Image (tube, rainbow, N blue to C red):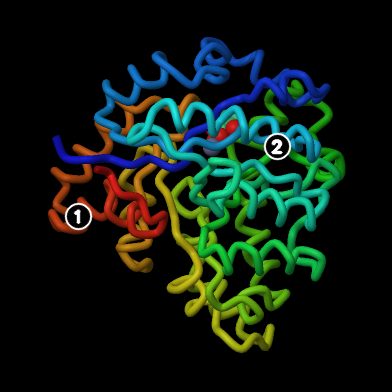
Amino acid sequence: RRPIITLEEHFLSRAAIAEPNERNQHFKAMPGLFDRFVELGPLRLDDMDAGGVTMQVISHAPGDLSVDGCRACNDQLADAVRAHPGRFAGFAELPMHDPEAAAAELRRTCSGQDNMSFVGALVDSHTEAGLYYDGPEFDALWAEAVSLDVPIYIHPTWPSDQLHEAYKAPHLPEITTLSILAFGFGWHSDVAVHILRLYASGVFDRFPNLKIVIGHMGEMLPYMLQRVERVCTPWGKERSFREVWDNNLWLTTSGNWSLDPMACLLRNTKHDRIMYSVDYPFSRSPNGLKWLEQLEESGMVTEEELEGIRWKNAAKLLKLDLN
Ligand code: GRE
Ligand code: ZN
């Protein structure tokens, strides 16, 4: 069978369950999710096998963890990666409310110390307090990522209190508000806005080799790319948004099983930037496989491009050797 690597695959750590965080309650309320979420063994491997997935790059779920919580979470994940070589790899969880500690944890998990060999980090799009990462205090983290040559995956997270307050519709049930504000739409556009903030703040001028990954077919940016390029020109950065798009950003398909956004992506994004991902356990590998088959049948990509999307682009970015 041809290989598949997926890289937006989540788990919920023992540390997260131990730290009081009301957002974990959202996960408990999702039917059939919790058992698969906390597990790093047979249920996950069965789903991978059913969907033809060779290797999952596993990361934590959204929700800020303390500095100690992140360490414990990463230690738990590292054990699972060591127990399943060739099937599991790891993205670190970082305490983004403390950028220096986040940089230190990236170094600990990705530099081969402590018997760990993570391939990057996946971080929430903002801290629980609503802080984005475009301030100079995050330069220490970007510098560390560049020096280790590992990507940082920016993943949606639950709306901050400010966002929730601004967008809530008081006449709608809370779950409806949340689905509009979070997984149905809002947290995707929030990641897109975050990328624009990083660009406008000159992060990619200061760190021209920084590698950022975003999921869900590019979090709406491909659809808006031409307008962003036009409107962002006066921001006066050394590099255009297009240069950043082509050189600093990678995209995954995570749980977005339609060929429509893919058609847009294939038209305006370099094909070696596109990487297949499932978004387990929120989405299941067999559903992703069906989508991959539709993509193949559609004739939208060549055989070689399909291999890139299935695993080669990820293997190159993450320096993964499947054998
Ligand atoms: C995701 O990771 O994409 C996700 C969550 C929580 C709910 C739905 C969802 O983290 O898609
Ligand atoms: Zn996800």
- Residue at image coords 27%, 23%: 49
Ligand 2 shows up in the quarter that is top right
Where's residue 114, x and y in %?
Answer: 60, 42
Where's residue 94, x and y in %?
Answer: 69, 45
Report whether 203 appears left or right of 215. right
Where's residue 258, x and y in %?
Answer: 35, 41
Q: Amino acid at mark 2?
A: Arg
* Nearer to the camera, 272 or 65: 65
In the image, residue 109 above or below residue 45? below
Q: Tag 2, which secondary structure?
A: helix
Q: Residues within 10 Å of mark 1 (few under 14, many from 20)?
A: some
In the image, residue 247 above or below residue 2? below
Q: Please say if the residues under marks 1 and 2 sit with CB atoms less than 8 Å apart.
A: no
The residue that label 1 is drawn on is: 300
Q: Amino acid at mark 1?
A: Met
Report whether 135 appears left or right of 196. right
Query: What whole-number distance in Å separates the C-alpha atoms at marks 1 and 2?
Result: 43 Å
Q: Which quadrant of the structure image shows residue 232?
A: bottom right
The residue that label 2 is drawn on is: 71
Report whether 9 appears left or right of 296. right
- Residue at image coords 61%, 76%: 207
